[in-house]
Amino acid sequence: MPERSYGVDPAIRTEIEQLISELLYRLDHDQADTTWELYTEDAETVGPLGPMRGRDAVKAWGAKRALQTDIVGRHFIGGIRLAWDAGVLTGTVAYLTFRDSAEDVLTPASVGEFREQYRLVDGEWRFARREIVPVFGGANAAAHARRLAEATEATETGDAR
C-alpha cells in the first residue's frame, strides 16, 4: 500500500482551495475559455464529457464551452479532503451542480465528487488530473454532456436548432 499522509500544510490547502474555487467560478461565469490556464501541460481530465489529455485539449474544450452563454449553472463544493499519496498531492471534493436546463432548477443536476491530483509548476499549484464522478444524477450529467456536444456541433456546422 502506498505511503499516505494527511498532513497537508495549511498554506498549501488554502492555495488548492483557491485553485478549485477559481476553476468553478470561471465555469459558472462564462469564462471556460480561460480554465486551461489552471492545468498542467500534461493534464488529464475524465468525466461525463469524455477524456481530455493535455492542456491544449482543455483549451479547445473551454473555447467551445465559452460560446454557449445560454447555459446557466452553479457549482457548490464542500468536504475537501487533501492528502499526500506517494509524493502526489491528491484531493477529493464533494460537489453539487445546478443548471437552469433542469426540469426543477432547485434540484441538483448532479451530485458527486471531483477526484484530483495537483502539481506545483513554477510556484503555482495546477490540476494535473481531474476526474468528475457523478454519484447521484449521473443520467442528468450524461444528458447535459449530450446537450453540450449537440450545441457544439450546431455551432461548428452553423446549424441553429
Image (spheres, rainbow, N blue to C red):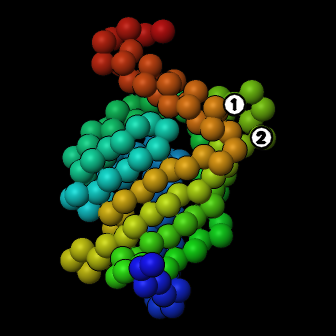
The x, y position of residue 59, in whole percent, is 28, 45
The kind of residue tagged 2 is Thr
Residue identified by numbered label 1: 102
Amino acid at dot 1: Ala
Q: Position of residue 150 (x, y in %)?
A: 44, 19
Which residue is at 21% across, 77% downward? 122
CA–CA distance in space, label 1 to label 2: 8 Å
Q: Nearer the viewer, residue 147 or 33?
A: 147
Q: Is residue 39 above or below residue 6?
A: above
Residue 127 location in percent, x, y? 36, 63
The secondary structure type at the circle numbered 2 is loop
Residue hosting label 2: 107
Left or right: 60 in relation to 71: left
Mark 1 crowdedness (10 Å alpha carbons): few <14, some 14-19, many ≥20:
some
Q: Quadrant of the N terminus?
A: bottom left
Residue visible at 49% across and 80% down in the picture: 83
Relative image position of residue 53 (x, y in whole percent): 27, 47
Q: Residues within 10 Å of mark 2 (few under 14, many from 20)?
A: some
Instruction: Mark 1 or mark 2: name the one nearer the start of the chain.
Output: 1
Q: Which residue is at a point 63% across and 38% down the rendered structure image?
A: 138
Residue contact between numbered discs 1 and 2, judged by CB atoms under 8 Å: yes
Can residue 84 be seen by looking at this rendering? no
Above or below residue 47? Residue 12 is below
